[in-house]
Image (cartoon, rainbow, N blue to C red):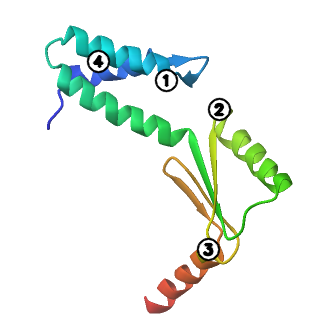
Amino acid sequence: MKISKRAQADAKSLLRGCFADGRLDEGRVRRAVALLLEKKPRGYLAVLAHFQRRLRLEIQRSTAIIQSAIPLSDALAARVRTRLEAAYGAGLQFQFRADPAWLGGLRIQVGSDLHDGTVRGRLERLQESLSA
């Protein structure tokens, strides 16, 4: 579905109104969508589609996913949180996941930024360089 520039601008404006104190407010998002669905202005479906896309990207940008082979200690988790907040700003939501397949190290994703310091990632990069 091609979205007009007007619908994109309206969605952007709608999203800007959903922030409180620099953070996305779920209540404001719900009210904005309810109001849009209630009034149903011309092209509201395109606005809603673009708003949903922008909202999904904003949520990804404010979520840090930290993966490791074993659960992190509280001290190490706190250090990771501090460093990520220094780099990306306050207000990040953190998700810590343990997956033995990583073998060791950390894999951190914030939005589209990916920092892979896992043993598995290094082995995969080494394999790619040898096969090229």
Q: Which mark is residue 112?
A: none
Question: How far apart are labels 2 and 4 at the CA level?
Answer: 25 Å
Q: Position of residue 76 (x, y in %)?
A: 81, 56
Disc 2, disc 1: CB below 8 Å? no
Q: Position of residue 92 (x, y in %)?
A: 63, 38
Tag 4–tag 1 contact (CB < 8 Å) = no
Local SS, label 2: loop
Residue 122 percent coordinates (x, y): 61, 78
Q: Where residue 60 sits: x, y (%)?
A: 49, 42
Q: What is the number of the mark on residue 10?
A: 4
Q: Is residue 72 visible?
A: yes
The disc labelled 3 sits on which kind of residue? Answer: Trp
In three-dimensional space, the C-alpha distance between marks 4 and 1, rounded to whole angstroms, equals 19 Å
Q: Which mark is residue 91?
A: 2
Image point 32% across, 28% down: which residue?
51
State the separation of the CA atoms marked 2 and 1.
Answer: 14 Å
Which residue is found at the position 18% from the left and 31% from the top?
3
Q: Which residue is mark 1?
A: 26
Mark 4 neighbour class, 10 Å CA radius: few under 14, some 14 to 19, many 20 or more: some
Q: Are marks 3 and 2 in contact (CB under 8 Å)?
A: no
* Eye-nearest disc, 3 or 1: 1
Q: CA distance from mark 3 to mark 1?
A: 34 Å
Q: Does residue 61 appear to the left or right of 57 in the view shown? A: right
Is 100 on the left or on the right of 38, as rendered? right
Number of the front mark, 2 or 4: 2
> The residue under label 4 is which amino acid type?
Asp
Q: Earlier in the sequence, mark 3 or mark 1?
A: 1
